[in-house]
Image (cartoon, rainbow, N blue to C red):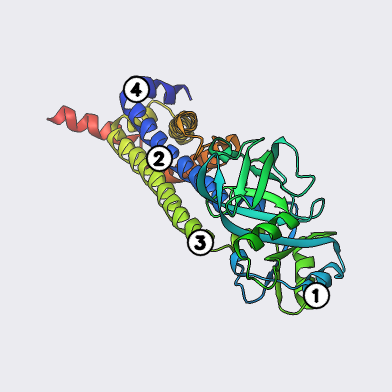
């Protein structure tokens, strides 16, 4: 370790540049992961952060809430399936609403108050207790969806008062209002007065035991439906898989680049200092001591890079806007940073093998050749 630190002190600029390069790549990895989490949360947060553990779609809806309709008979049959503790309807629709005098689009999630479907990430205020009340997505509070604000649907025919705010509760990148099922029905009828009936978009269930097993049982017992556990339903929403795959491809490339940068740097550095390594072996340093020195340098550089990248992510989170917040998650920094350190160690294998091949006689040979010249 002493040998490794002594070399780092002698070549501060070289190792600092490498640590900075690794730090930039780590920041890219962390930022991409954070951006992906925020973006997916804007697409799926309302469905992910509600209390229903099983989501039941019409089997022809292809797991799309906006294309799904269930009948009252299907909802009743869902409630009778073994393992279902409580079941209820979910009405979802996108409406043009007026908030603080401005027209905007918002998604209404209607559920039976006290039943499955209520928001689970309440950060301020309270849950709806009667018709005409709502919990809104907290990120939209400044846009007319704050506690005490009134949101109007269908030119004021339906007025909804915001009584609570929930984190991570957007849907399809739109503000969300969690309301009673009756309020959702009223809003739907107000904008579609000629509709013969208003049917729920999906069914929700709170279950006893494993949600995936109960979802399978619902699918087998109830005709015309497809039941999924909440996590699977969220991942199956339109656009989620494509966005995840695109970002994951970029992340894989970033991890590969980190590995190559560290690997090539230490391999080139090792080749450059072969004369010094052979001399150290001639002075009695063992292979193990020299290998430990290289490993220590890899650890110092990679850990420094992780700290730099984590610090840059923290600065980015402080500079992010409320409309699209970037949050620095310590667990994300720890897991991704650990992966970078592990990959850096694996990348140094080529340099370590080169160190092991160095012979003490190389130093003697070089000295002899120097004397002959």
In primary-sequence order, the first of circles 3 and 2 is 2
- Alpha-carbon span between mark 4 and mark 3: 47 Å
Work out whether residue 59 or residue 279 is closer to the camera in this orientation and state it: 59
- Number of numbered markers: 4
Q: Is residue 12 left or right of 136 when viewed as pictured?
A: left
Which residue carries the number 4 mark?
A: 12
Specify whether 201 is left or right of 16.
right
Q: Residue at x 34, y 22 (%)?
A: 12
Mark closer to the chain start, 4 or 3: 4
Q: Which residue is mark 2?
A: 25
User: In front here: 226 or 135?
Assistant: 135
Q: Secondary structure at mark 3?
A: loop
Which of discs 4 and 3 lies nearer the camera? The answer is: 3
Q: Is residue 80 above or below residue 175?
A: below
Q: Are marks 3 and 1 in contact (CB under 8 Å)?
A: no
Q: Mark 3 highlights which residue?
A: 239
């Amino acid at each position: 370790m002493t040998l490794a630190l002594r070399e780092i002190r002698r070549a501060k600029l070289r190792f600092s540049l490498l640590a900075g390069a690794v730090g930039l790549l780590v920041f890219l990895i962390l930022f991409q992961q954070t951006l992906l989490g925020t973006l997916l949360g804007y697409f799926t947060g309302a469905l992910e952060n509600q209390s229903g553990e099983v989501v039941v779609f019409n089997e022809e809806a292809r797991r799309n809430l906006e294309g799904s309709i269930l009948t009252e008979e299907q909802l009743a049959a869902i409630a009778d399936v073994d393992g279902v503790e409580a079941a209820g309807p979910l009405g979802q629709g996108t409406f043009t609403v007026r908030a603080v005098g401005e027209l905007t689009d918002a998604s209404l999630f209607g559920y039976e108050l006290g039943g499955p479907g209520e928001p689970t990430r309440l950060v301020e205020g309270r849950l709806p207790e009667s018709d005409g009340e709502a919990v809104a997505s907290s990120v939209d509070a400044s846009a007319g969806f704050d506690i005490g604000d009134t949101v109007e649907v269908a030119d004021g025919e339906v007025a909804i008062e915001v009584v609570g705010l929930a984190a991570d509760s957007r849907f399809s990148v739109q503000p969300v209002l969690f309301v009673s099922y009756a309020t959702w029905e009223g809003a739907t009828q107000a904008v579609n007065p000629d509709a013969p009936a208003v049917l729920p978009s999906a069914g929700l269930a709170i279950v006893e035991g494993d949600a995936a097993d109960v979802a399978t049982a619902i699918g087998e017992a109830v005709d015309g439906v497809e039941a999924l556990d909440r996590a699977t339903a969220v991942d199956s929403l339109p656009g989620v898989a494509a966005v995840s795959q695109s970002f994951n491809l970029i992340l894989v490339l970033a991890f590969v680049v980190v590995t190559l940068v560290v690997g090539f740097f230490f391999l080139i550095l090792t080749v450059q200092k072969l004369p010094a390594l052979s001399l150290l072996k001639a002075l009695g340093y063992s292979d193990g001591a020299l290998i430990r020195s290289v490993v220590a340098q890899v650890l110092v550089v990679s850990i420094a890079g992780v700290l730099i990248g984590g610090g840059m992510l923290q600065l980015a989170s402080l500079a992010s806007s409320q409309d699209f917040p970037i949050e620095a998650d310590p667990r994300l920094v720890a897991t991704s940073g650990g992966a970078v350190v592990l990959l850096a160690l694996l990348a140094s294998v080529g340099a370590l093998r080169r160190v092991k091949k160095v012979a003490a006689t190389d130093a003697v040979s070089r000295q002899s050749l120097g004397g002959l010249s």
